[in-house]
Image (cartoon, helix red, strand yellow):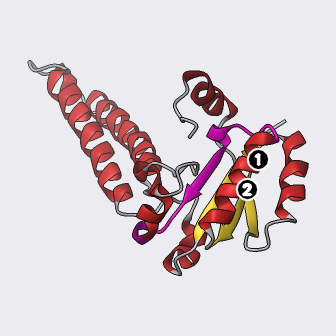
Amino acid sequence: MKMQRSYMISDDLDDLETLEKQLEVAGVSKPQIHVLSPKAKDADVAHHSHLHEIQSIMKSDVVFSTVRAALLGFCAFVLILVVAYVAGWTESAAGWMPFVFLAIVLFGFVTWEGGLYGIQKPNHHFARFQQALQAGKHIFFVDLEPQQEAVLEKLLKDHRSIELAGSGSSAPRWIIAVQRKLGVIRHS
């Protein structure tokens, strides 16, 4: 079965830290738990050493936009080569080389521009929370296995300052497993 991401909103970091500790005791691993904070409150999160804040690169849409642009760049790459072949331009003395070079340059440029565009935009997964972030609240999200969802529901009953804010697609299970195996996220 597929993992599910549960989103919560709160302005109480102490309560979020307590919830994270309780989730870990209940068997939810640290790579499954994240906190997204407004930029103005990053220092506050740093004072809560147990909270796992997402990396700054993941706050923007740079990865998603770069991948999308790379797909578009690949289409441009193929289009240039097909047009050059169909038009007969590759039969000249220069052959394929200028067209392959142009296709590679265009692929790289389109991919690069996609990354520059994405770095300016908030991550598309968090776009629905921009109003809460602008209000100074924190977004707490947990990637849960189906059997772990009941644990979260039970724990949330004791945390009145945390409001459930929906669900979405989770990080792939293999990414979480690699983080767990490599110890990428350190316990405090």
Amino acid type, callout 1? Leu
**Is residue 125 something that shows in the picture?**
yes
Q: Residue at x 28, y 45 (%)?
A: 112
The magenta span reads: 26-40
Question: Quick one: quadrant of the N terminus?
Answer: top right
The Cα–Cα distance between marks 1 and 2, rounded to whole angstroms, is 6 Å
Amino acid type, callout 2? Leu
Residue found farthest to the left: 93
- Residue labelled with disc 1: 23
Tell me residue 90's x, y (percent): 20, 23
Label 1 Cα crowd, 10 Å radius (few <14 / some 14-19 / many 20+): many
**At numbered mark 1, what does the secondary structure look like: helix, strand or loop?**
helix
Residue 80 or 34: which is nearer the viewer?
34
Label 2 Cα crowd, 10 Å radius (few <14 / some 14-19 / many 20+): many
User: Marks 2 and 1: in contact by CB < 8 Å?
Assistant: yes
Instruction: Tell me if 98 is positioned left or right of 32 in this view.
Output: left
Q: Residue at x 39, y 40 (%)?
A: 70
Vertical placement of residue 31 versus 38, above or below? above
Question: Quick one: quadrant of the C terminus?
Answer: top right
**Is residue 4 something that shows in the picture?**
no
Residue 152 or 186: which is nearer the viewer?
186
- Residue labelled with disc 2: 19
Instruction: Tell me if 6 is positioned left or right of 60 in this view.
Output: right
Tell me residue 146's x, y (percent): 86, 42
Tell me residue 170's x, y (percent): 69, 46
Q: Residue at x 62, y 28 (%)?
A: 180
